[in-house]
Image: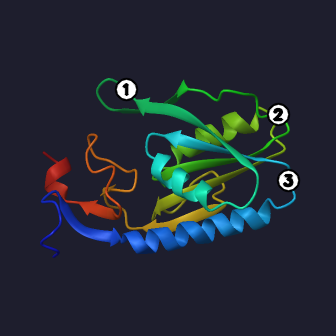
Amino acid sequence: MNNDLHPDLARILVPEDTIQAHVKVLAHQISLDYADVERLYLVGVLRGAFIFLADLVRHLTIPHSVDFMSVSSYGKTAVSGEVRIVLDLREPIVNQHVIIVEDIVDSGKTLSYLYHTLKGRGPASLRTCSLVRKHRDHIDVPLHYLGFNIPDVWVVGYGLDYADRHRTLPYIAELKEEVYKK
């Protein structure tokens, strides 16, 4: 175990240099895929995707704009399974090429909700991009661009948090079980 790690962390799953290299690869692929469009509209899902999205768009070589949405799937006492929009887009996306940028796909419920909601708003195209996906059997939404598959453990860093902690770590780490099972 790395002695420099915060005591809440079990191990680093994806080091900073690996993340940065793959963000460049994703940006290159997106730039190729959208080379012929007038403008790509990227929708970051707050709060977790802000670091990933910032790094991703700095490597794009095509015209693009950025907006954000915030959703909540939590009730007062537990995960309710119901997703609601807390912050919506600033402009309509009719006839625009849109990519939803998410930090993590866990159950897929949030991304599925956003995908189907935005699909109903008439974009010219709609794709999804996630930094990480937990290894699960099935999600019911297409995932077009993916950084990393990770084990089904609680992760923090590079936008991902636990109780508003560890979000700004430059790598993705596994949180010790005793921290979130308190």
- Neighbor class of circle 3 (other Cα within 10 Å; few <14, some 14-19, many 20+) is few
Residue 8 coordinates in the image, percent (x, y): 16, 56
Q: Which residue is drawn at 48% across and 68% down?
A: 20
Is residue 22 placed above or below 116 in the rendered structure? below
Depth check: give the residue in front, 130 or 110. 130
Instruction: Quote the CA–CA distance across marks 3 and 1.
Output: 40 Å
Residue highlighted by disc 2: 94
Q: Which of marks 3 and 1 is nearer the N terminus?
A: 3
Display coloring: rainbow
Callout 3: SS: loop
Residue highlighted by disc 1: 75
Residue type of the residue flagged with mark 2: Val
- Neighbor class of circle 2 (other Cα within 10 Å; few <14, some 14-19, many 20+) is some
Q: Earlier in the sequence, mark 3 or mark 2?
A: 3
Depth check: give the residue in front, 81 or 133. 133
Residue type of the residue flagged with mark 1: Gly
Residue type of the residue flagged with mark 3: Val
Q: In this image, 10 relative to 16: left or right?
A: left
**Visible residue check, residue 81:** no
Instruction: Quote the CA–CA distance across marks 3 and 2.
Output: 14 Å
Pick the quarter of the image with the N terminus.
Answer: bottom left
Residue 146 coordinates in the image, percent (x, y): 57, 64
Instruction: Quote the CA–CA distance across marks 2 and 1.
Output: 31 Å
Residue 9 coordinates in the image, percent (x, y): 20, 61
Callout 2: SS: loop
Q: Residue at x 70, y 36 (%)?
A: 118
**Visible residue check, residue 3:** yes
Is residue 32 placed above or below 169 in the rendered structure? below
Residue 153: image quadrant is bottom left
Residue highlighted by disc 3: 37
Callout 1: SS: loop
Question: Is label 3 or label 1 in front?
Answer: 3
